[in-house]
Amino acid sequence: MKEAIVQPNLDVNIVDSPTPVPGDDEVLTKVVVAGSNPKDWKRPEMASKAMNSGDDHAGIVHQVGKNVFEFKPGDRVACFHKMMAPGGSYAEYAISSAHATFHIPHETSFEEAASIPLAAMTAAVGLYQRLEGLPMPWHPTTKPIPLIIYGAATAVGAYAVKLAQLSNIHPLICVAGRGIPFVEGLIDKNKGDVVLDYREGDETLIASMQAAGKKAGGKVEYAYDAVSEHGSFENICKVLDHQTGQIALVLPGRDYSAIPSSIKKSSNMVGSIFPDYDQEPIHKEAGTPAGNPEFGYIMYRFFARGLQEGWFTGHPHEVVPGGLGGISGALKNLKDGKASAVKYVFRLGETDGVEKQSTSGVYSG
């Protein structure tokens, strides 16, 4: 099979690799569309190591492991590949754990589906597993809960907005830049939601966030920082309550010492939905079987139901020409900050040397 290997300088080599074999609890998917995320350029660069860094894909199930009961060859699925493991998404065939794989309706395109797995789960883990006290969508709140979402036009931020809406969390104090028109289409101004422009400068932004907080009752206890750099969390902490405030951050391993110790901070590790990556196995302390992996399992099926019923959608996407051959340019654009309110996705059938495939979902394997 053809596989894209991303170099530390973000050049991409397309190589011939053996088709991976799924483990007992895994799904092998014939990839129709692969999606991209900022980590796809960060990991090769930071590790100084060439790798298939893709983790989002959608396509047709080709083979399943012996313990897999939900999926069979021919199913249309979207998948979150386990980060840093073999069998990544930038290839003709990719591996995913069964619990991080979900069915997609026939009305949902592979392009839209490929925009969902990592970013939507990152939003869900941060909102519901890291920020303590926010209601799940099936138990929506009936009282105001102000929530700052910084970077609301990013894929992770936009999914945080969508999930917060489903939980009836308002007012949403959203921060964005070029993507403001997109975010305005997601929020509910009738419930007090606002979008603020970080390009107006830190002082103006902080004052605007403080004003929005006062209008909501004067106390802001929750923040989701989908940027976690360039002064984002410092600005948020000027607004968060310093006694009861909580902030979820998306970039692990950064220096967050500027956050006051009285504000509860937590790094949002989406990889925690995989058992051996779960760094906060609270369920083990309680002696119960359910933890972050089970949360991931439930949320992916929740997304699938939302897609089918129309109350959940993927992120706006741009198809990059050339299939795997377009990955290098797309990742360089991501690094340079050229993408706003859009996900880059790649149709595998456009790759040189790869058989053209139908995106209709008809299985021919």
Image: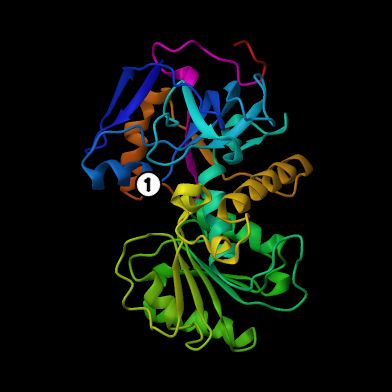
Residue 212, position in %: x, y?
57, 81
Q: Is residue 351 left or right of residue 183?
A: left
Q: Amino acid at mark 1?
A: Lys
Residue at image coords 41%, 22% = 322
Residue 163 seen in the figure: yes
Residue at image coords 21%, 42% = 48
Quick one: 213 or 300, which is closer to the camera? 300
Numbered range of the magenta stretch = 340-360
Residue 186 seen in the figure: no
Which residue is denoted by mark 1 in the rendering?
39
Quick one: 359 or 317, which is closer to the camera? 359
Quadrant holding the N terminus = top left
Quick one: 19 or 168, which is closer to the camera? 19
Residue 220, position in %: x, y?
56, 82
Residue 282, position in %: x, y?
54, 64
User: Please, what secondary structure does the residue beneath circle 1 have?
Assistant: helix
Q: Is residue 341 magenta?
A: yes
In the rendered view, would you say 201 is above or below 250?
A: below
Q: Is residue 351 magenta?
A: yes
